[in-house]
């Protein structure tokens, strides 16, 4: 959230103040108007629109340390540290670089 401070000047009119000055021969009535200005500061919070991050999603993730590759949703693929993680969309990329397939997510087929 971003904070924007605006200053607004509002003039408020008071009712007419009458001064009555009495002199000996006659009464003199003076009318005095006093408008009052007040300065108000308002704090308005405006949300900053966020930019959407464009992070690519790869189908396969491999570890350069252990030379194994996993699918994106494999529990062992999620344990790979960032500095050892290699990502790509094709299985051929990893098999060509002598990566071994994961025994849990790639070699075992799900029973239907």
Image (tube, rainbow, N blue to C red):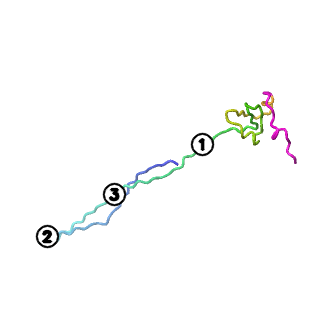
Gap in Å between the C-alphas at discs 1 and 3? 42 Å
Name the secondary structure under disc 1.
loop
Q: To which quarter of the image does residue 110 belong?
A: top right
**Label whose residue precedes the other's in the sequence (3 or 2):** 2
Name the element at disc 2.
loop
Say which residue label 3 marks. 37
Residue denoted by label 1: 51
Given contact means CB atoms under 8 Å apart, are the residues at marks 2 and 1 in contact?
no
Rendered view: 25 above or below 33: below
For marks 2 and 1, the one nearer the N-term is: 2
Asked if the magenta segment contains residue 106, the reply would be yes
Specify start and end residues of the magenta stretch as a single range.
96-112
User: What residue is at 67 percent from the left and 39 percent from the top?
Assistant: 55
Within 10 Å of the Cα at label 1, are there few (<14), some (14-19), or many (20+) other Cα atoms? few
x%, y% of residue 102?
A: 80, 37
**Residue at numbered disc 2:** 23
- At mark 3, the secondary structure is strand
Q: Does 49 sit left or right of 16 as displayed? A: right
Residue at the image point whose x is 76% and y is 35% from the top: 89
Query: Residue at 54% of width from left, 49% of height from top?
Result: 47
Q: Where is residue 71 in the image (x, y as percent from the top left)?
A: 77, 39
Q: Height in image: 41 above or below 89?
A: below
Task: Please state the horizontal and vertical placement of residue 14, each as a whole percent of the image.
Answer: 32, 64
Q: Is residue 34 left or right of residue 84?
A: left
Q: How far is the residue under mark 2 from the one under mark 1? A: 76 Å
Name above or below for residue 75 compared with residue 16.
above
Q: Earlier in the sequence, mark 1 or mark 3?
A: 3
């Amino acid at each position: 959230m971003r904070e924007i401070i605006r200053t607004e000047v509002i003039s408020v009119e008071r009712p007419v103040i009458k001064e009555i000055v009495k002199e000996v021969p006659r009464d003199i009535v003076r009318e005095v108007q006093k408008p009052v200005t007040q300065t108000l500061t308002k704090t308005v919070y405006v949300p900053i629109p966020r930019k959407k991050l464009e992070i690519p999603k790869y189908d396969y993730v491999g570890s350069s340390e252990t030379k194994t590759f996993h699918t994106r949703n494999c529990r062992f693929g999620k344990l790979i540290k960032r500095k050892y993680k290699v990502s790509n969309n094709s299985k051929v990329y990893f098999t060509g670089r002598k990566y071994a397939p994961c025994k849990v997510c790639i070699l075992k087929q799900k029973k239907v």
